[in-house]
Amino acid sequence: MTQQFTDHQGRAVVVEEITEDNWRDVADVAPADGQRQFVAALAARYLLLSQRGEVWTSLGVRAGDDIVGHVMWAYDDDHDAHWIGGMVVGAAEQGKGVGRATLGAVIEHLSALSGCRQICLSYHPGNTSAGSLYTSFGFQPTGDLEDDEIVMALLVS
């Protein structure tokens, strides 16, 4: 069953594959200045990681008719877990519920993949709003660190 995720303006927020039609808009997504200590200055960095690193898969985030963000995911076969990374919401979209809706949409996307039993992510300890968001979705700290970031996991039923 597909759930609809919406922002505070009532726009449907979805994650979508990167295509010839949307990649430039996704690449141009830039976070608010205060977020740049936690994420890349442009989503283009994450698109390149996905393309060149062959580990991550980038997704665009669309709210209504507009590309408003980026998120990527990967599968870690050593730990039998899917990972969320590189979540960036455009500066003009901050505080509108886009991040919450994006997280819901990407969890749903990953949960629908065959064999998805656990979703993990990490965040910088100084990014307390991210920690609160992840906890509100049921993510729990694992006690592990990934590059000095707190690792959290969500069991998928």
Image (cartoon, rainbow, N blue to C red):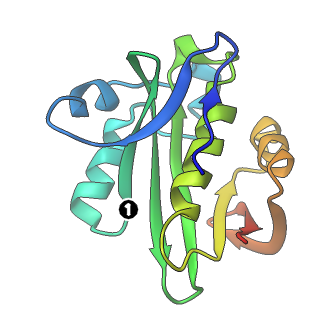
Q: Is residue 8 above or below residue 68?
A: above
Q: Most extreme residue toward the front, as rendered?
A: 1
How many residues crowd around disc 1 within 10 Å: few (fewer than 14), some, or many (20 or more)? many
Q: Which residue is mark 1?
A: 56
The image position of residue 154, as x and y in percent, is 75, 65
Q: Is residue 113 above or below residue 60?
A: below
The image position of residue 41, as x and y in percent, is 44, 31
Residue 12 quadrant: top right
Q: Is residue 143 left or right of residue 62?
A: right
The image position of residue 86, as x and y in percent, is 49, 47
Count of marks, rendered view: 1
The image position of residue 22, as x and y in percent, is 24, 30
Q: Amino acid at mark 1?
A: Trp
Q: Is residue 85 above or below residue 8?
A: below
Q: Nearer the viewer, residue 47 or 18?
A: 18
- Residue at left offset 45%, top offset 66%: 74
- Residue at left offset 66%, top offset 73%: 118
Q: Is residue 44 left or right of residue 105?
A: left
Secondary structure beneath label 1: loop
- Residue at left offset 27%, top offset 68%: 54
Quadrant placement of the C terminus? bottom right
Q: Is residue 76 left or right of residue 18?
A: right
Q: Nearer the viewer, residue 87 or 101?
A: 101
- Residue at left offset 57%, top offset 20%: 32
Residue 141 quadrant: bottom right
Q: Most extreme residue toward the bottom, as rendered?
A: 78
